[in-house]
Image (cartoon, rainbow, N blue to C red):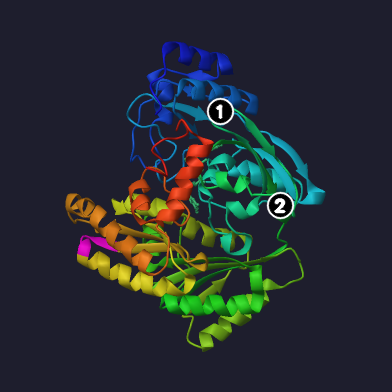
Amino acid sequence: MPRPPSRDTLNELKAAVGSGSWFDSQEDLAPYIVDFRRLYRGVTPLALLPRDAAQVSKILEICNRDEVAVVPHGGNTGYCGAATPDESGSQIVLSMRRLNRVRRLYAANDSMIIEAGCTLAEAQTAARDADRLFPLSLGSEGTAQIGGNLSTNAGGTAVLRYGMMRDLVLGLEVVLADGRVMSSLKSLRKDNTGYDVKSLFIGAEGTLGLITAASLKLFPLPADTATALVAVDSPQHALDLLSMLRTAAGDQVTTFELMPRLAVELTVKHVAGVANPLAQGAAWYLLIELTSPNPRQNLAALLTDELQRAATEGMVEDALIATSIAQSLAMWKLRESVPEAQRHHGASLKHDISVPVSSVPKLIEDGSALVRRLAPEGDVLGYGHLGDGNLHFNVSLRPGADSTAFLRRGEQLERAIFDLVDSLGGSISAEHGIGRLKAAEFASRADPVELSVMRDLKRTLDPKGILNPGKVLT
Ligand SMILES: Cc1cc2nc3c(=O)[nH]c(=O)nc-3n(C[C@H](O)[C@H](O)[C@H](O)COP(=O)(O)OP(=O)(O)OC[C@H]3O[C@@H](n4cnc5c(N)ncnc54)[C@H](O)[C@@H]3O)c2cc1C
């Protein structure tokens, strides 16, 4: 069991990074003790900002020897309280933001080696500067870091085409709990030498090791893009359209995002510069994007043909294909402003869940019935990555309704929604992780054998339990 650090340990940790690379005043520590959603406020005696893997190694060696708990801290945009220390005051914070170099970009291998503290936007820019694409794309990309993206196995709006963060990794450099450095920064597409150890650290939320650098896959830049905003009357028609587009365009279908009417109305109302160019009052809206590296693909024509055919067959009510970059950006702004609009609208209960794509209509129908029964003060605002079967099935407090009663119902509603998700063969965390927020629910719902394998791995890799205790595994 980790214990509070002694004064000597704290001094040794400060010396490991040198002056200017640690904070211990309440004022300086403030950004490190509250999570993005302000669900948790912790206490820490020290935040360390190492500059390289050797310093991270020294820190973990000391912490492991003295049994001091360490909380890795990336961009702090996570939604599950996983980068926040607990209230004991005994956990130190390890900020990764100064490990922010692009070590090497191999255009010929379509790969780059980049440090964990680079933001996702910096990684995208480095790739673009070499005429390549790093395709992970999140609303938080200006702040979220590569290490955080890896540790949460982040998803986002291009998973349909490129997969989640796990699918974009060729190799990792990881500092283990005892300070040893596992250096496996290969750029290989094929490597069948034993177990896939790097995979363990992806999605582990800092509980198995500290990721200091990654070898990531790059792709050709899109040279042809077609973006459309589409109105449909039901999630089933949205899925029928997805199937039709995939048949016609294969994995050129990069983005397929669903928004209910309420989401669109709230973004237009609350976020400056957002407009809905389609017929008002449609039940559901889709943001669809097709991309190809071939500039002569003529994706706009393909998308126009398919949408016209879908309209004839009664799947589509209205559609607009962007004819300029500005129009495409405006469509994206509408989709990406949904979380902000929801924040302005007031209190909400959030559920990041996934089911097999074909079960999304049932999830929405049965989930909405649960909300009407268990949280009648709220309106369903379920939006997100329909192409991946992943919805942010959120519930927003109706204006003027009793917020205390609404928030009190959160736990019961969450349990009922998770039961529904389980019954549909889904996941209680599609892309945001477990962290502290879902650790208890995860423990009660996961397959017991799988859970015991996870606990065995944790004991093997972190026998003293110093890495991000209380997160993922209870
Ligand atoms: C506006 C907005 C939009 C978002 N959209 C999406 C989305 O579409 N899809 C999606 O998946 N998520 C989304 N998120 C959630 C969030 O941005 C992601 O989970 C992101 O990957 C977290 O990265 P971070 O650097 O902020 O990590 P943090 O929040 O700092 O940390 C997350 C976890 O990773 C651990 N960690 C951080 N760095 C390291 C490291 N180097 N080594 C080991 N462990 C580490 C932390 O201890 C913690 O457990 C969104 C968030 C916001 C605010």
Picture quadrant of residue 266: bottom left
Q: Please identify the quadrant where the N terminus is shown.
A: top left
Picture quadrant of residue 172: top right
What amino acid is found at the position of numbered circle 2 in the picture? Leu
Q: Residue 394 appears at what percent x and percent y?
A: 35, 58
Label 1 close to label 2 by CB (< 8 Å): no
Q: Residue 301 appears at what percent x and percent y?
A: 67, 77
Q: Relative to 382, does residue 140 appear above or below in the rendering?
A: above
Q: Residue 265 appears at what percent x and percent y?
A: 37, 63
Compared across the picture, whether 11 is left or right of 219 comes to left
Q: Please give the name of the residue rendered at 54% of the width and 73% of the height, measured from the top-left corner.
A: 320
Q: Please give the name of the residue rendered at 51% of the width and 88% of the height, measured from the top-left corner.
A: 313
Q: Which residues are magenta?
A: 374-379
- Measure the alpha-carbon separation of dots 1 and 2: 32 Å
Q: Which residue is mark 1?
A: 178
Secondary structure type for disc 2? loop
Q: Relative to 246, does residue 135 appear above or below in the rendering?
A: above
Please count the marks in the image.
2
Q: Please identify the quadrant where the C terminus is shown.
A: top left
Compared across the picture, whether 31 is left or right of 417 comes to right
Q: Nearer the viewer, mark 1 or mark 2?
A: 1
Q: Which residue is mark 2?
A: 218
Q: Please give the name of the residue rendered at 39% of the width and 67% of the height, measured from the top-left corner.
A: 260
Q: Earlier in the sequence, mark 1 or mark 2?
A: 1
